[in-house]
Amino acid sequence: MAASPKCEVRTNPVTKRLARNFDGLFPGRDLVQEPHLIVTVALQTQHRQSAMSDEMLTERQECFKVLMERMTRVKAHFDGKDQWCDFIDPATGAPFHTDSATTLVECDERYRSLGFEILELGCCRSLCNERFGQCLVMTSAFMSCSEDDLAAVLPLLEGR
């Protein structure tokens, strides 16, 4: 992946219904009590993620590195403002900074509530969205901030 991949960032305010979907993901954190946002970052890939190949696996690992770098920078930004933020490690589905027994893997049904589709392919499941189809790798971040606060880190999330 020589050039930075195309990126899609989606923002979802956490409602009571949405918060129930993620109960237990961040123990001790009440996602309803104060305003929280869930931000998904999807990177477009050249290879469909449902077609297993060495090239796909290599590209996937490169995307994981890009996502981790972006999310780490966003987390540092919010830490500097004393605002809570954590993100999902795309390789494991576990919260990166919170000790939790609950995970949010890429093909988790809960991603449907954030605008993604989960395809049942018989042999496996594949995440897809309208813009990139099955050619994507993604992760999500959960943050206690306003949409205005989030606007400051959109360039980091988008890789600009």
Image (spheres, rainbow, N blue to C red):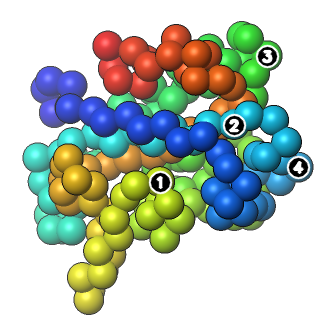
Estimate how packed mark 2 is, as few (under 14), some (14 to 19) or many (20 or more) residues with alpha carbons within 10 Å: many
The quarter of the rendered structure image containing the C terminus is top left
The residue tagged with tag 2: helix, strand or loop?
A: loop
Which amino acid does the dot numbered 1 rest on?
Leu
The residue singled out by tag 3 in the image is 82
Query: Of label 2 and label 3, which has the lower sequence position?
Result: 2
Query: Of label 3 and label 1, which has the lower sequence position?
Result: 3
Whether pointer 2 and pointer 3 mark residues with C-beta atoms closer than 8 Å, the reply is no
The mark lying in front, picked from 2 and 4, is: 2
Q: Which mark is residue 114?
A: 1
The mark lying in front, picked from 1 and 4, is: 1
The residue singled out by tag 4 in the image is 28
Which amino acid does the dot numbered 3 rest on?
Asp
In the depicted view, which residue is nearer to us: 135 or 58? 135
The residue most toward the bottom is 122
Whether pointer 1 and pointer 4 mark residues with C-beta atoms closer than 8 Å, the reply is no
Q: CA separation, marks 1 and 4?
A: 23 Å
Give the percent coordinates (x, y) of residue 6. 20, 32
Give the percent coordinates (x, y) of residue 45. 18, 45
Report whether residue 30 is seen.
yes
The residue tagged with tag 3: helix, strand or loop?
A: loop
The image shows residue 24, relative to residue 88, as above or below, that is below
Q: Is residue 87 left or right of residue 81?
A: left
Q: Is residue 37 left or right of residue 24?
A: left
Give the percent coordinates (x, y) of residue 22. 67, 59
Q: CA separation, marks 3 and 4?
A: 17 Å
The residue most toward the right is 28
Which amino acid does the dot numbered 4 rest on?
Gly
The residue singled out by tag 2 in the image is 36
Image point 38% across, 34% down: which residue? Answer: 9
